[in-house]
Amino acid sequence: MAKDNKTNVMRILDRAKIPYKYYFYDHEDGKIDGVSVAHKLGQNVEQVFKTLVTRGASRNFYVFVVPVAKELNLKAAAKSVGEKSVEMIHVDEINKVTGYIRGGCSPIGMKKQFQTVIDSSCEQFPSIIVSAGKIGAQIEVEPHALLNFIGGKTAEIAQ
């Protein structure tokens, strides 16, 4: 791949010597939801994950990574980070908080590393696919390598 086609996420993983595969997909049709992306890549929707950002009752931000065909269980998510409750941040806040835009939010390379929880279903796969930090790009990485790199943990947070 040409060096200028790499996303910041890919460069970060390269520097950390974490192996990954990358995928690019056409997004001109406007279909950037996770299920559409999984279908475009010919991948199992249970193995493609989306990155969601929340705010806890404490006003701290948390990142949750769940399969694209599922939703975040807010109660389970709050419990996993020791919060009374969490709520999704508004789409307008995504860039300000993470440095990413909707449809291109990755658990890797945010402006600040927030506490991150990946749904425990990731453990049933040798690799999972997450955003590479921009619309049209995804990376496939071993779940434990990702967890170790971002200092994350797993919990049952999807429904």
Image (spheres, helix red, strand yellow):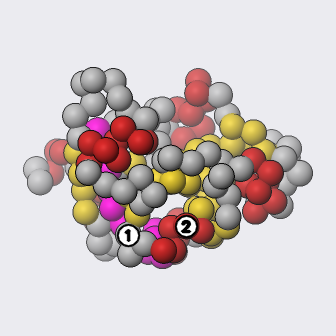
Residue displayed at 48% across by 32% down: 102
Quadrant in the picture for the N terminus:
bottom left
Q: Residue at x 15, y 51 (%)?
A: 3
Is 82 left, or right, of 137 in this rendering? right
| Residue 95 position (above or below residue 5) | above
Quick one: label 2, few (<14), some, or many (20+) residues within 10 Å?
Answer: some
Apparent side of residue 122 relative to residue 85 in the rendered image (left or right): left
The residue at 46%/33% (across/down) is 101
State the SS at label 2.
helix
Report x, y in % for residue 26.
22, 34
Q: Is residue 75 visible?
A: yes
Task: Determine whether, in the image, residue 33 is placed left or right of residue 41.
Answer: right
Is 48 in front, or is 81?
48
Q: CA distance from mark 2 to mark 1?
A: 11 Å
Is-magenta flag for residue 45? no
Q: Amino acid at mark 1?
A: Ser
**Pointer 2: what residue?**
121
Q: Amino acid at mark 2?
A: Ser
Q: Nearer the viewer, mark 2 or mark 1?
A: 2
Q: Which quarter of the picture shows residue 4?
A: top left
- Which mark is drawn over residue 127? 1
Q: Residue at x 35, y 47 (%)?
A: 38
- Residue 147 at x, y percent in the picture: 52, 70
Q: Which residues are magenta?
A: 136-146
For residue 60, the mark is none
Q: Residue furthest right?
A: 84
Residue 46 spot, x, y in % from top left: 45, 58
Q: Residues within 10 Å of mark 1 (few under 14, many from 20)?
A: many
Hey, which quadrant is residue 113 in on the image?
A: bottom right
Residue 80's x, y, as percent?
76, 62
One can see residue 16 in this view: no
- Of mark 2 and mark 1, the one earlier in the sequence is 2
